[in-house]
Image (cartoon, rainbow, N blue to C red):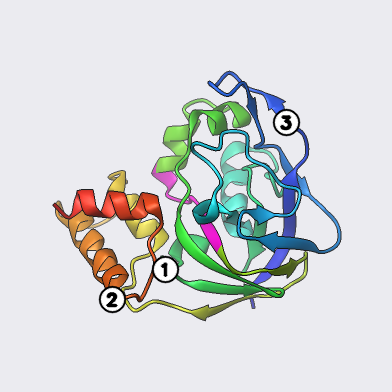
Amino acid sequence: MAELLAVCRVHVLLPDAGTVGVTAIDKRPVEGRVKVRPLGLYADVQADRANHGGPDQAVYAYAQEDAGFWSAELGREVPPGLFGENLRVRGLDVNRAVIGERWQVGSALLEVTQPRVPCQTFGRRLGEQRWVRRFTQANRTGAYLRVIENGEIGAGDTVDVVQTPVHGVTVAEWFGARYRVEETGPSDPNLLEKLARRLLDAHAVGDIRLSVDMLRRSEQAAR
């Protein structure tokens, strides 16, 4: 059974060398239940709203199992919120979630929209050499979610997958093909196009609703 280990919101805005000048990546666990609305968790913010947040990236989830992988790699703890995630979950392979998959968490219904693409702000946050490249190559991105039904969530809630689209394209498959992450076995030079067409077909018949970013990238890949 998958479980929500922590709900994280911005703790404080930190100075950042990027164009915005500050970052809201410093998320930390909060106690009690938190309201979830179309733009994310109550009292959470994003500093760079041109590239983060909005209905398609309302909530960011990361798995405890992936945090454990990075803890071993980095030789330090990876506590909930360190990667800027809102939800730290256990017992659910977030990277293998199908795009458009729906999760019941507390009284909120959430839908997987796309992988997290690491940025330089994330690299500065971790302070690790070549962090963006390492995070990309590991293909353990976690997932963004949109809010289908408002609700309240809290640590200890179960995370139930209640709907899985038939197209089958996962967060990790799309990210791996999009950024040419090397996989074991023979590579398929047309994989990204094939995945894109599956997503576009599912979007066209209403099986899923692609995010603005995913729709644009899928259309580009399918040309």
**Nearer to me, 99 or 39:** 39
Q: Residue at x 39, y 76 (%)?
A: 165
In the rendered image, the quadrant that contains the N terminus is bottom right
Alpha carbon of mark 1 to alpha carbon of mark 3: how far?
32 Å
- The residue that label 1 is drawn on is 98
Residue 32: percent from left, percent from top = 86, 62
- The residue that label 2 is drawn on is 205
The answer to which of marks 2 and 3 sits earlier in the sequence is: 3
Q: Which residues are magenta?
A: 137-146
Looking at numbered disc 2 in the image, what kind of residue is underneath it? Val
Residue 40: percent from left, percent from top = 64, 55
- The residue that label 3 is drawn on is 13
Q: Assess disc 2: are there few (<14), some (14-19) or many (≥20) residues with their C-alpha within 10 Å of its C-alpha.
A: few
Residue 96: percent from left, percent from top = 44, 65
Q: Nearer the viewer, mark 1 or mark 2?
A: 2
Direction from residue 137 to residue 88 in the image, left or right: right
Q: Residue extending furthest top? A: 17
Q: Residue at x 50, y 36 (%)?
A: 50
Q: Is residue 160 above or below residue 188?
A: below
